[in-house]
C-alpha cells in the first residue's frame, strides 16, 4: 500500500438513509417513555396529559384548560422561586455584613497583637538597660562624687519600674 501524499481520500458510500423524519406512531411513542425515577414517581400527570393531546394539537376546551392550568402552575412556581431567591439574597446580605464586621474585628486584633509585641520589646529593653545602668552605678557609689552614681541608680530603678509596670494598660474587649 503505497499512499501518495497528494491523493484525496475516497468518497463515502451511499448508506441508503433518507433525510426525512417521520412522525412516530402511538406504539413507538409509548415505547419511548421514561422509566420510573429513583424517587418512586414514574411520570408527572401534567406531562402525560400534554403527551396525550400532542398528537392532534391543542384543539378544544379540554386542551385549552390543561394549558391554562399548567401555565398558572408554572407562574405560581416562578413566583415561589423568586420569593425564595429574594429571601436568599437577604440572608446573603446579612451574612456578608457579619463577615465584614468580623473581618474588621480580626484586623483590630491583629493590630493589637503587633502593638503588644512592640510594647513587650520596649519593656524588655527598659528592664535590660535599667539593670545595666543601676548595676554599674552601684560600683561608683562609693566614690567621693555621689551625685552622678545616685542619678544613675535612680535612672536604672526608673527604667526597671517602667519596664515592669509601665506598659500594661487594659484595653476594651472587641466584640
Image (cartoon, helix red, strand yellow):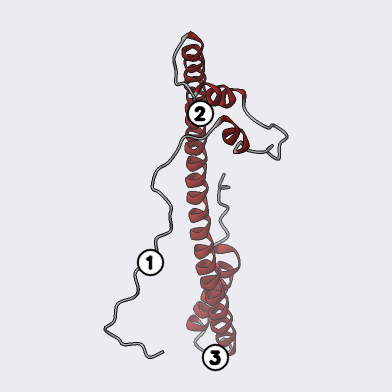
**Counting other residues with Cα less than 10 Å from the Cα at mark 2, is it few (<14), some (14-19), or many (20 or more)?**
few
**Counting other residues with Cα less than 10 Å from the Cα at mark 1, is it few (<14), some (14-19), or many (20 or more)?**
few
Give the position of the N terminus as an image quadrant: bottom left
Give the position of the C terminus as an image quadrant: top right
Residue marked by disc 1? 12
Sequence-first disc among 3 and 1? 1
Would you identify the image quadrant in which residue 166 lies? bottom right
Disc 3 from disc 1: Cα separation? 118 Å
Q: Is residue 13 above or below residue 71?
A: below
Viewer-proximal residue, 66 or 81?
Answer: 66
Sequence-first disc among 2 and 3? 2
In the visual, does 57 lie left or right of 34?
left
Marking on residue 81: 2
SS for callout 1: loop
Question: What residue is rendered at 51% in x and 75% in y?
Answer: 155
Q: Nearer the viewer, mark 1 or mark 2?
A: 1
Viewer-proximal residue, 46 or 33?
Answer: 33
Disc 1 from disc 2: Cα separation? 52 Å
Spot the residue most to the right: 40
Residue 34 screen position, x and y as percent:
62, 38
Residue marked by disc 3? 143
Question: What residue is rendered at 57% in x and 86% in y?
Answer: 141
Amino acid at each position: 500500500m503505497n499512499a501518495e501524499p497528494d491523493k484525496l481520500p475516497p468518497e463515502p458510500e451511499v448508506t441508503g438513509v433518507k433525510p426525512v423524519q417521520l412522525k412516530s406512531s402511538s406504539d413507538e411513542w409509548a415505547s419511548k417513555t421514561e422509566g420510573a425515577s429513583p424517587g418512586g414517581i414514574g411520570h408527572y400527570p401534567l406531562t402525560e396529559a400534554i403527551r396525550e393531546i400532542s398528537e392532534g394539537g391543542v384543539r378544544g376546551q379540554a386542551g385549552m384548560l390543561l394549558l391554562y392550568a399548567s401555565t398558572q402552575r408554572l407562574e405560581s412556581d416562578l413566583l415561589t422561586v423568586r420569593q425564595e431567591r429574594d429571601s436568599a439574597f437577604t440572608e446573603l446580605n446579612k451574612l456578608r455584613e457579619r463577615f465584614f464586621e468580623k473581618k474588621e474585628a480580626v484586623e483590630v486584633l491583629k493590630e493589637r497583637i503587633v502593638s503588644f509585641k512592640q510594647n513587650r520589646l520596649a519593656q524588655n529593653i527598659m528592664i535590660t538597660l535599667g539593670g545595666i545602668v543601676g548595676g554599674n552605678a552601684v560600683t561608683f557609689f562609693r566614690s567621693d562624687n555621689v551625685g552622678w552614681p545616685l542619678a544613675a541608680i535612680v535612672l536604672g530603678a526608673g527604667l526597671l519600674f517602667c519596664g515592669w509596670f509601665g506598659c500594661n494598660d487594659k484595653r476594651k474587649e472587641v466584640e
